[in-house]
């Protein structure tokens, strides 16, 4: 084996020293660097896991909040529809009341107008009767003062009517 090692150009004491140096360096690196690097990697893995858990919790809370918002929107929409329906009912009732009141007012005004017309008609008839009575008396006086001729009577009545307020002047 010495010849094979020499044929390869290896120096056995130097190889053993290098192997021993490698193991010493490996132990030193394991103690100084490997454990802190593993600890740092474990901490980073833990932070990543915590971040993923927090993101999952936030996602669940967002979904819950979205569902809550949807429920509130549905309730608000329903309340809005009820308010609109109530407003429409109130508007319909107000319109019906206004129509009914307008009908009552119209009937009252119509009745007042009929009463006024009847009063004016009665007054006009009374005035006409008084005027006609006066005209008739005047015509009779003129007829009596003049001859008893039928044509003369008619002429006197026509003259009296022409002199009265009913002549259309």
Image (spheres, helix red, strand yellow):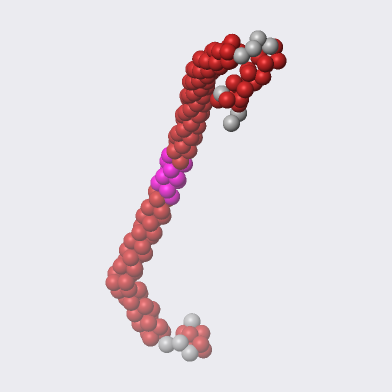
Q: Main secondary structure of the magenta part?
A: helix
Q: Quadrant of residue 69?
A: top left
Q: Nearer the viewer, residue 21 or 155?
A: 155
Residue positioned most to the right: 151
The residue at the point 48 percent across, 82 percent down is 1
Residue 11's place in the image compared with 114, above or below, is: below
Picture coordinates of residue 25 (x, y %)?
33, 77
Residue 52's place in the image compared with 124, above or below, is: below
The reply to whether residue 57 is in sight is: yes
The residue at the point 36 percent across, 57 percent down is 46
Is 62 a magenta residue?
Answer: yes
- Number of numbered discs on residues: 0
Q: Nearer the viewer, residue 1 or 85?
A: 85
Q: Quadrant of residue 15?
A: bottom left
Is 89 a magenta residue?
Answer: no
The residue at the point 60 percent across, 28 percent down is 168
Q: Nearer the viewer, residue 37 or 69?
A: 69
Which part of the image, by quadrant, shows the C terminus? Answer: top right
Picture coordinates of residue 73 (x, y %)?
46, 41
The reply to whether residue 115 is in sight is: no
Q: Nearer the viewer, residue 10 or 26?
A: 26
Horizontal arrangement in the rendering, residue 3 relative to residue 22 (left or right): right
The residue at the point 48 percent across, 85 percent down is 5
Q: Which stretch did the figure color magenta? A: 59-72
């Amino acid at each position: 084996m010495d010849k094979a090692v020499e044929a390869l150009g290896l120096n056995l004491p130097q190889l053993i020293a290098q192997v021993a140096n490698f193991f010493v360096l490996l132990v030193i690196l394991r103690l100084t660097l490997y454990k802190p690097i593993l600890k740092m990697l474990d901490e980073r893995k833990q932070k990543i896991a915590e971040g993923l858990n927090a993101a999952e919790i936030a996602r669940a809370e967002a979904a819950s909040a979205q569902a809550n918002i949807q429920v509130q929107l549905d309730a608000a929409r329903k309340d809005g529809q009820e308010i609109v329906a109530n407003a429409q009912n109130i508007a319909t009732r107000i319109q019906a009341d206004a129509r009914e009141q307008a009908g009552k007012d119209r009937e009252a005004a119509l009745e007042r107008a009929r009463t006024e017309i009847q009063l004016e008609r009665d007054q006009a008839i009374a005035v006409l009767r008084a005027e006609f009575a006066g005209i008739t008396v005047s015509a009779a006086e003129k007829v009596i003062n003049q001859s008893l001729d039928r044509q003369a009577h008619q002429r006197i009545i026509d003259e009296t009517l022409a002199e009265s307020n009913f002549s259309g002047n």
